[in-house]
Amino acid sequence: MPQKWTLAEMPRLDDKLAVVTGANRGLGLEICVGLAGAGATVVMACRDARRAETAVQEIRRRVPQARLEVMPLDLADLSSVRRFAQDFNTRFSRLDLLINNGSAIMVPLQKTRDGYEMHIGTNHLGHFVLTGLLLDRLEATPGSRVVNTSSMAHRLTKGLKLDDLHFERRPYKEMDAYGQSKLASLIYTFELDRRLRQAGSGVIAAAAHPGWSNTNPDQGTALMRWANSFMAQPAAMGALPSLYAATAPEVRGGDYLGPGGFKELRGHPAKVGSSDEARDPELAARLWARSELLTGAKYLSGS
């Protein structure tokens, strides 16, 4: 890995098709800029059509030759996830890159359309279902990858509470809920990698986090927004670990990428560590089973 990997080191992606969730702002928008700049066709999976159109205009301002398509996706509504997947699978026969980036970040206690706590429902369960529904297209595409977005906050939660994922029996705290969802994303990535390899699949599953980046300036507490504006690195830098995970030839299944600077807060992409809980295969198998039960989505279950 180059010590200071940038977009200049990213390979050309002229024949590649990518799906990016949460593509209309922050980290997702910068990921789309990077992929489109390298020639990929990017399907921007967005909840808000107006914001998506504004994002398309911004990306095309920066990458005039960008090949972009917008498709509606609300990760907090599994019927929307299923419609997206059905429409995508009807239109496309391949998928090179699935970037599961969309996130609820530090929101007050609320439920998804399906009754899940918003963070775990959006950040983990929505992507769990989406990945399963797009897996045939990924399998049909040599060298395809799934990149899930985690966070340093996965270390700040009190742990993954499988018997109370939705904060029905414990006090709700925004950071704990967000951290739990990002821990779940990381656990899921490592278990997805294990199951893909056991199935003899060539699909690579990796994870990335943006460090302390100003990726969603209008989300989080007032104090967080203020601190972001002064201390966080730009969203474009925060996007580099995801772009590295999605495109660098040396990336392997189960890799976790983040900023390589002090405390992983900022800097160029590097392999980073995770909590012991994130790498616990027994917990991962239980999370997978719980995710299947909650969503009805079943795939890679023969391992």
Image: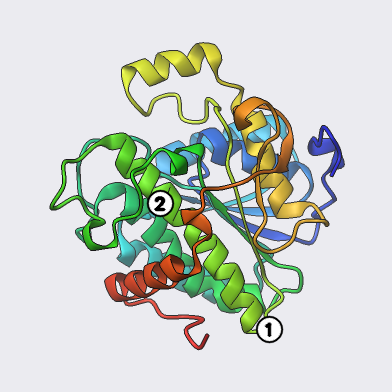
Measured along the vertical axis of the image, is residue 169 above or below residue 295? Answer: above
Q: Could you tell me residue 81's position as x and y percent?
A: 39, 64
For this orientation, the residue located farthest to the front is: 276
Q: How crowded is mark 2: few (under 14 residues within 10 Å), some or many (20 or more)?
A: many
**Does residue 113 appear to the left or right of 104 in the view shown?**
left
Q: Could you tell me residue 189's position as x and y percent?
A: 54, 61
Which of pointers 1 and 2 lies earlier in the amino acid sequence? 2
Q: Compare residues 52 and 147 and report the one nearer the observer.
A: 147
Q: What residue type is labelled 1?
A: Gly
Q: What residue did someone put label 2 on? A: 123
Q: Compare residues 56 and 162 and report the one nearer the observer.
A: 162
Disc 1 is placed on an element classified as loop
Q: What residue did someone put label 1 on? A: 200
**Disc 1/disc 2 C-alpha distance (Å):** 27 Å
Residue drawn 19% across and 50% down?
167
Q: How many marks?
A: 2
Q: Could you tell me residue 80's position as x and y percent?
A: 35, 62
Measured along the vertical axis of the image, is residue 206 above or below residue 90? Answer: above
Q: Compare residues 193 and 134 and report the one nearer the observer.
A: 193
**Does residue 1 appear to the left or right of 168 in the view shown?**
right
Q: What residue type is labelled 2?
A: Asn
- Image quadrant where one finds the N terminus: top right
Measured along the vertical axis of the image, is residue 22 above or below residue 61? Answer: below
Whether the residues at callouts 1 and 2 have beta carbons within 8 Å, the answer is: no
Residue drawn 66% across and 72% down?
94
Measured along the vertical axis of the image, is residue 30 above or below residue 10? Answer: above
**Residue 261 picture quarter:** top right
Can residue 271 be seen from the camera position used here?
yes
Q: Compare residues 282 and 64 and report the one nearer the observer.
A: 282
